Image (cartoon, rainbow, N blue to C red):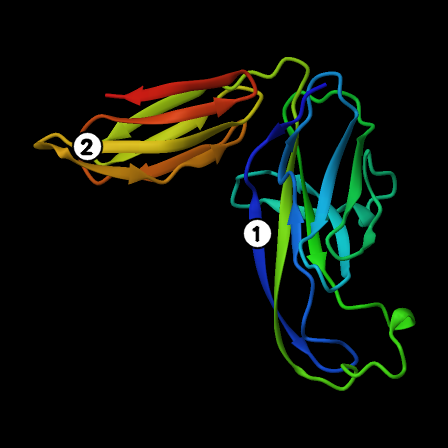
Amino acid sequence: MNITIFQGKRLWLGTLVLALSPITQAGLLLDQSIVIFDEAQVRADVRVINDSNENKLFASVEPFLVTSPGEEDEELVPLSSLDDPEFIVTPNKLIIEPGSNGIVRMLNMAEPAQTDVIYRVNFTPIEKPLELQRADDDDATRTGVQIVLAYQALVIIPPPEPNAIPEVTRSGKSVIFANSGNSNYKLTNGLQCNPQDPSDCRELIGARVYAGNKREVQLPFDGPLQFNMQSVAGRQVLAVP
């Protein structure tokens, strides 16, 4: 059983600390921020790391089902609001000692779907729970603005026979990447060079194209371009004349 790992999203959260909590906080890191289940896999573990050598890390873990992924009406539905969720993430809160780590386990109990099933999981540092705060804590009366670095992990559960099918159309300095398959693909390392000056090359912003989605990319030149295309099946070069 294999897990494919990529770099994922980090979320900057500005929090107003009103009272009863220290401004200094431990740092949160993940060893995986994109997890792709393979065909036979029902379990995956994410390691949550406390990179502070001084402070305990208190973190909450909240999973969401992504409906209409990549579309304008995309929505994150908290799994806690569902009566019988088929994807379980445990635990929902962590206390991690300085320089240590903890495990969050993801369990997929759903029957195979026809297309990718997408989840997102928020890992957010939180303040020390009230029941753990000491009455004589010197920081209890401190106030201030705290910047919190949180992570959002992407979880992809492909169908039994995943197949990403890219379809490309272009007009001048615009190119549209569609996906008529049943599984997502990701465009990375995009590059286009000026047809009039081959030494003038520009990087192109990539995107993840979910099944049934379209993504439009605006180009600096009216000329050939290429992306690396990563899917469950592997990596290939996608050249557009």
Depth check, front residue: 182 or 198: 198
Circle 1: element type: strand
User: In the visual, does 131 lie left or right of 14?
Assistant: right
Residue drawn at the location 64% of the way across and 38% of the way down: 32
Q: Considering only order in the chain, which callout, 1 or 2, is on the residue closer to the N terminus?
A: 1
Q: Quadrant of residue 57?
A: bottom right
Classify mark 1: residues with Cα within 10 Å, few (<14), some (14-19) or many (20+): some
- Residue 125's tag is none
Give above or below for 225 relative to 59: above
Task: Tell me residue 200's x, y (percent).
Answer: 15, 37
Q: Is residue 152 visible?
A: yes
Instruction: Give the residue type that dot 1 points to.
Output: Arg
Give above or below for 46 relative to 80: above
Task: Tell me residue 52's x, y (percent).
Answer: 68, 59
User: In the visual, does 20 lie left or right of 114?
Assistant: right
Circle 2: element type: strand
Quadrant housing the C terminus: top left
User: In the visual, does 185 lie left or right of 132?
Assistant: left
Q: CA distance from mark 2 to mark 1?
A: 31 Å
Residue drawn at the location 41% of the way across and 35% of the way down: 215
Q: Quadrant of residue 198?
A: top left
Residue annotated with mark 2: 193
Residue annotated with mark 1: 10
